[in-house]
Image: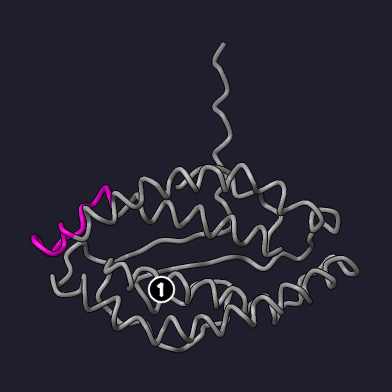
Amino acid sequence: MTTPAPPPAVAHPVQLDLNAPLAVARWRVIGNPVMAIPLALYLYLLTIVVGVITFIAWFAILFTGKYPESMFGFAAGVMRYQWRLITFYLYMREPYPTFTLVSTTADPGDDPATFSIPYPEKLSRGLIFVKGLLVIPVMFVLMVLLIGAFVVMVIGFFAVLFTGKWPEGMRKYMIGLFRLSFRANAYTNLMTDVYPGFSTQ
């Protein structure tokens, strides 16, 4: 009697990746963080708006079980923009991110840094009260991963500076760390009821 194969793992709705060459110009370890300053200021303003949207969405979900779709698209666009900025700031890619905010749930494919999150037709009214507590174990995992990320970033800095190339395994580590972080953020920002889990894949 053969053992039935286990069902395939279901992919998390929040998908994040980076499709860029490992090789980058050596000067970018200094140049990219400096050039990212205007982008960071813009992102700061966008995150303030997302904070207001999340507050409104909390009540919308409480009374209707739905996240306002237009607001959801804006919040998804800000998360996508944040990911693009992070990859540029950490000199993991060369193309400069535009200031355009793409308010779509599916990634438009116009940038090496990709981010997608489907719009949920229905969200749990009860979970909005406890998501902040439920995500605490994931935050502990992220804290441990961040310790490793500090070491990786130091090594990555000198690797790019002297060789013009990110070590592949280390860049995958960083992408995985941010993948889990963005899933946790989407969960606490009420954009999905799917628990972030602990996988960085």
Residue at 58%, 65% in the rendered image: 117
The secondary structure making up most of the magenta span is helix
Magenta region includes residue 73: no
Q: Is residue 173 left or right of residue 16?
A: left
Residue with the mark numbered 1: 84
**Magenta stretch bounds:** 158-170
In this view of the protein, which residue sits in the foreground, 151 or 21? 151
Image-based side of 55 in relation to 153, left or right: right
Which quadrant of the structure image shows residue 28?
Answer: bottom left
Does 105 appear above or below 49?
above
For the residue marked with disc 1, what is the amino acid?
Answer: Arg
On the image, the x and y values in percent for residue 122 come to 79, 62
Check the image and name the residue furthest to the left.
162
Residue depicted at x 65% and y 57%: 187
Q: Is residue 165 magenta?
A: yes
Which image quadrant: the N terminus?
top right
Front-most of residues 93 and 42: 42
Q: Which residue sits at x=13%, y=70%?
A: 26
Q: Quadrant of residue 158?
A: bottom left
Disc 1 crowd rating (10 Å Cα; few below 14, some 14-19, many 20+) is many
Tally of numbered tags? 1
Q: Is residue 45 shown above or below 175?
A: below
Residue drawn at (43%, 68%), measured in percent from left and top?
114
The kind of secondary structure element at disc 1 is helix
Q: Is residue 185 left or right of residue 145?
A: right
- The foreground one among 198 and 119 is 198
The x, y position of residue 84, in whole percent, is 41, 73
Residue 69, placed above or below residue 121: below
